[in-house]
Image (cartoon, rainbow, N blue to C red):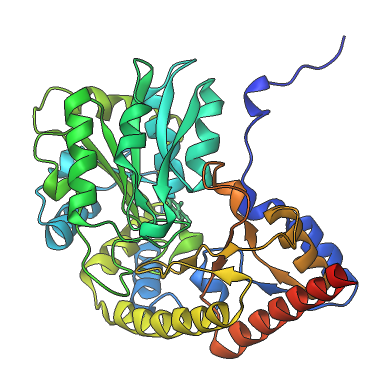
């Protein structure tokens, strides 16, 4: 008898890490790789603030090394509630905050609460890959709604409306957005909120980049969704430089009070199965939210300069264009002209020939075509200069080859 595997995994992939084996091969041949693929500031010159590390250590020394509540320790949930009030002006009852091992776990919990086989969630295109892959685990699927490149990747609400049907269970909004770096306007959010209310569909609002705003003003979706059920997802990885610590949370904002207990119970049934989130890390989370916040300003200053440097290189290259990201540390440029078959060919050959590792855009969804890539602008100036120099050299070589 043959061993059988679950079919649920057949369509699950995570494009950001998919090309790592090719990078390792290139590295083995002696070429130094410049990694612009992963949104992890700690791989570059950003460090977890020392007061957060101290709080982790102290929590452990003081004996907070036990299994804690599955929902998360009360002190952290209180701190999260105060933090949401400060950033978004929204009142969230700590009873409806659930602490998770990063937003990654939160995404999975939420999709599982709402999805049955054959059902759909609406996700932006391009989209963070977990939202595209996770529904398949439950024999559902992600349906992409278009974001308009020429308008700074703002969501196309007409397309969103057209894609709603009786199988739609959730609308996902990622603001600020990964991979485009777009910061949505009050008007764009208002339109999504109105459509969701009209059709009684809950919104999942991924706010993990809400403090990494380079230009403009952040508007929290929850703050304008007065009549909607909103499930907010947020975490400590990016703004508090704690990627490897795995800490995030879900909050439930239910103006009707009709659904919040069932949703919390659905999440907690899953949370109990994994017992709890790392307990000392939760104590460190309190220090992160309530301690000094200066590192965020420093981070934004660096990121703004690095973004502008990368854009300068792209503007100077007639084969590349980009929208300017107003938030996050991602850029989603377009490769123009027919020099390359598609984004995958561009990215794989750039990695093999020049050792520059970026992610092909079609891995973030199919609607925006197959000629984009995502690059992070986290590295120091000289590394960005080197990476973009190599990318230009690679494109020039291709032009010569095609001209022959
Ligand atoms: C939009 C978005 N949501 C969620 C995550 C997952 O973050 P975490 O480290 O909290 O699991 C990421 C990570 O890059 C992200 O970009």
Q: Nearer the viewer, residue 182 or 376?
A: 182
Residue reaching furthest top? 1
183 with respect to 88 (left or right): right
> Can you give x and y, in whole percent of width and height, for residue 398 in the image?
80, 71
| Residue 217 position (above or below residue 265) | below
- Quadrant of the rendered structure where residue 374 is? bottom right
Q: For residue 346, which quarter of the picture?
A: bottom right
Question: In the image, is 213 to the left or to the right of 252?
Answer: right
Camera-side residue of 87 and 96: 87
Whether residue 101 is visible, yes or no, is no
Q: Position of residue 284 (x, y in %)?
A: 34, 64
Q: Quadrant of the C terminus?
A: bottom right
Name, please, the residue furthest toward the bottom.
382
Q: Quadrant of residue 392?
A: bottom right
Q: Name which residue lies at 17% across and 30% down.
A: 197
Q: Quadrant of the N terminus?
A: top right
Question: Above or below — where is 232 with respect to 85?
Answer: above
| Residue in front for this viewpoint, 73 or 261 | 261
Residue sticking out furthest to the front: 403
Residue 146 placement, left or right of 288: right
Q: Position of residue 21 (x, y in %)?
A: 79, 56
Q: How many marks?
A: 0
Q: Residue at x 71, y 72 (%)?
A: 356
Can residue 394 be seen from the camera position used here? yes
Q: Is residue 54 above or below residue 13?
A: below
Q: Residue at x 37, y 60 (%)?
A: 152
């Amino acid at each position: 008898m043959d061993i059988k595997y679950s079919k649920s995994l057949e369509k699950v992939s995570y494009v950001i890490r998919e090309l790592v084996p090719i990078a390792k091969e290139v590295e083995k041949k002696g070429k130094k790789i410049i990694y612009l693929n992963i949104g992890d500031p700690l791989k570059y010159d950003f460090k977890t603030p020392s007061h957060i590390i101290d709080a982790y250590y102290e929590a452990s020394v003081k004996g907070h090394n036990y299994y804690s509540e599955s929902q998360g320790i009360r002190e952290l949930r209180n701190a999260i509630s105060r933090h949401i009030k400060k950033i978004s002006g929204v009142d969230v009852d700590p009873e409806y905050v659930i602490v998770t091992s990063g937003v990654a776990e939160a995404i999975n919990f939420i999709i599982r609460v709402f999805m049955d086989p054959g059902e759909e969630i609406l996700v932006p295109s391009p989209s963070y890959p977990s939202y595209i892959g996770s529904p398949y685990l439950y024999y559902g699927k992600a349906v992409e709604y278009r974001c308009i490149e020429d308008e700074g990747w703002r969501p196309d609400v007409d397309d969103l409306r057209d894609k709603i049907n009786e199988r739609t269970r959730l609308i996902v909004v990622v603001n600020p957005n990964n991979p485009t770096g777009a910061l949505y306007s009050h008007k764009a959010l208002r339109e999504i909120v109105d459509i969701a209310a009209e059709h009684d569909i809950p919104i999942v609002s991924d706010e993990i980049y809400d403090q990494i705003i380079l230009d403009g003003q952040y508007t929290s979706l929850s703050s304008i969704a007065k009549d909607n059920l909103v499930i907010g997802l947020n975490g400590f990885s990016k703004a508090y430089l704690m990627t490897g610590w795995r800490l995030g949370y879900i909050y439930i904002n239910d103006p009707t009070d009709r659904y919040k207990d069932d949703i919390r119970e659905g999440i907690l049934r899953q949370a109990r199965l994994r017992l709890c989130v790392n307990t000392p890390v939760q104590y460190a989370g309190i220090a992160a939210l309530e301690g000094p916040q200066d590192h965020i300003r420093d981070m934004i200053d660096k990121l703004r300069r690095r973004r502008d440097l990368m854009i300068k290189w792209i503007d100077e290259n007639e084969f590349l264009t980009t929208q300017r990201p107003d938030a996050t540390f991602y850029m989603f440029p377009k490769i123009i002209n027919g020099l390359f078959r598609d984004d995958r060919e561009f990215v794989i050959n750039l990695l093999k020939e020049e050792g520059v590792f970026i992610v092909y855009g079609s891995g973030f969804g199919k609607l925006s075509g197959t000629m984009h890539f995502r690059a992070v602008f986290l590295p120091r100036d000289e590394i960005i200069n080197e990476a973009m120099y190599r990318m230009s050299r690679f494109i020039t070589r291709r032009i010569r080859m095609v001209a022959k």
